Image (cartoon, grey):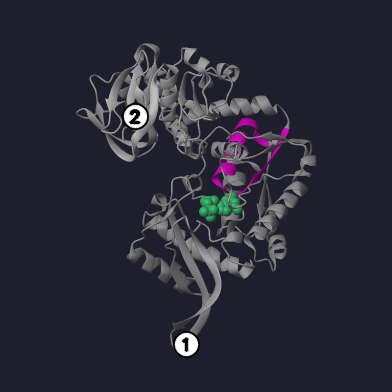
Amino acid sequence: MSTLHSERILILDFGSQYTQLIARRVRESRVYCELHPYDMTMAEISAFKPSGIILSGGPKSVYDSGAPPVEEALFELGVPILGICYGMQLLSQHFGGKVVPAGKREYGHAVLEAIGEPGDLFDGFFTEGTSSVWMSHGDHVEVVPVGFEVVARTTNAPVCAIQNPQRNLYGVQFHPEVNHTPQGELMLSTFVRKICRCSGQWTPGKIVDDAVARIREQVGTEQVILGLSGGVDSSVAAALIHRAIGDQLHCVFVDNGLLRLDEGDQVMATFAGNLGVKVTRVNAQRRFYDGLKGEVDPEKKRKIIGNLFVDIFEEQAGEVEDAQWLAQGTIYPDVIESAGAKTGKAHNIKSHHNVGGLPDYMKLKLLEPLRELFKDEVRAIGEELGLPKQMVWRHPFPGPGLGVRVLGEVKEEYCDILRRADAIYIDELYETGHYHKISQAFAVFLPVKSVGVMGDGRTYEYVIALRAVETKDFMTAGWYPMPYADLARISNRIINEVKGVNRVVYDISSKPPATIEWE
Ligand code: XMP
């Protein structure tokens, strides 16, 4: 095992909605970590060789029957442990403490007060003895576990942080992983860097070196195919695999006619041109437009687009002699989400397919070099690999592309109008500096005609809707408060420059109840 992976934190998930955030915070401290379900066995935990363990929060009470238990032998491993919320309660219970329902459920901001000298974990955490924290719990520790001291309290939770520094065991009732706890990131970083003694080697340069070595080891002299979409994940996967095995990588880029303005040419310029990657471009626009003809149902449109992609990809893959591997840009949140789907935790509202469903008979081995990385890490190594900044930091773009942004039936004419309107919109967002404050922005084509007036005549033309949202996780989102002056300029430009459009509207709906896309 490489030295990179010899420093690793294990996070055990007891079902809190914030568990993924713990993992992100740990990675932001440049320390590798993995998130596993709470029922990981002791043998698996020992084999993982953690430098430290974090027990997450969870929705249950430790005294309930059916509450997720912890492997008690964990506490005898001798590695540092931090219990958060439910995790702290498990720790307390194990060491003879008592957990009871709180008199008052606590949710939201609270003022944490230090008791005495808080010690190493809390280095820099308190200012003049207090710190603002985020609480979300219905239970608290009433009787302090044996061997522990109380480090901090709030008005409603007299035992809000505990520690046994001799054994490196810590528990906090609040959530250090959320942004609402301003010093939380510092605390988690102190835990992994100082208490667990991880030196912070998980840097973009080292991630690339490590991934390159692993790809070479896995693939050997065999051939790999990859479906390039122009999106961040498949682009970074391609650049990384190319760095590792050069011409053994064969990319297929399917232009489905549902891409953004000039996107196909940009992808080819970056990969085939600058990086020297072998890319076959398939101009399949007509096949997609024909396949989508007459279809108005969004889910059916997604299926048609997905199936056509698979057909075309398969045809192209057949051209690559001896291909043994299929590479995909699967990233860590996809892995966690599908693990969650198995335990019934995650629910899919739309069929978010990426390039997943290749037929079994293709019998290719899967190469997923980004499987352990969060989006921020993928972007950081994309820059490290020399991909253009604009490609790396681009907003997410759905697999079915403009197919779900032209509402109802997809026609080439509609896609062309939408492409041009969208390009003006995004161009203005870059110019005004809004682009990087927004999580996702795009234009939508509405297939309705409304009346307008231009010069002396009446017009009867299409409507473009503009969407811009702010979100952390894309599960909930708020609409972006775009200044009126900027909206006015964007609207003027679109109406003046895009033939066929005489009306522009701005979407002011949040998710939920609306979704980010219109279909
Ligand atoms: P919604 O519209 O469900 O979108 O609020 C949440 C995020 O998912 C993206 N999205 C998709 N991505 N295939 C994809 O690869 C799809 O079919 C799809 N539908 C929505 C959307 O762009 C947003 O980022």
Q: Quadrant of the N terminus?
A: top right
- Residue at image mark 2: 186
Q: Is residue 192 above or below residue 356?
A: above
- Please state the horizontal and vertical placement of residue 321, each as a whole percent of the image: 79, 39
- Please state the horizontal and vertical placement of residue 332, each as a whole percent of the image: 55, 36
Dominant secondary structure of the residues highlighted in magenta in the image: helix
Q: Residues within 10 Å of mark 2 (few under 14, many from 20)?
A: some
Q: Is residue 2 above or below residue 427?
A: above
Q: Quadrant of the C terminus?
A: bottom right
**SS of the residue under disc 1:** strand
Point 40% across, 21% down: residue: 92
- Which residue is at the front of the view, 432 or 331? 331
Say whether residue 239 is magenta. Answer: yes
Total labels: the figure holds 2
- Residue at image mark 1: 457
- Range shown magenta: 223-247
Q: Residue furthest bottom?
A: 456
Residue 239 visible at all: no
- Please state the horizontal and vertical placement of residue 224, each as a whole percent of the image: 70, 36
Q: In which quadrant of the rendered view does residue 107 lie?
A: top left
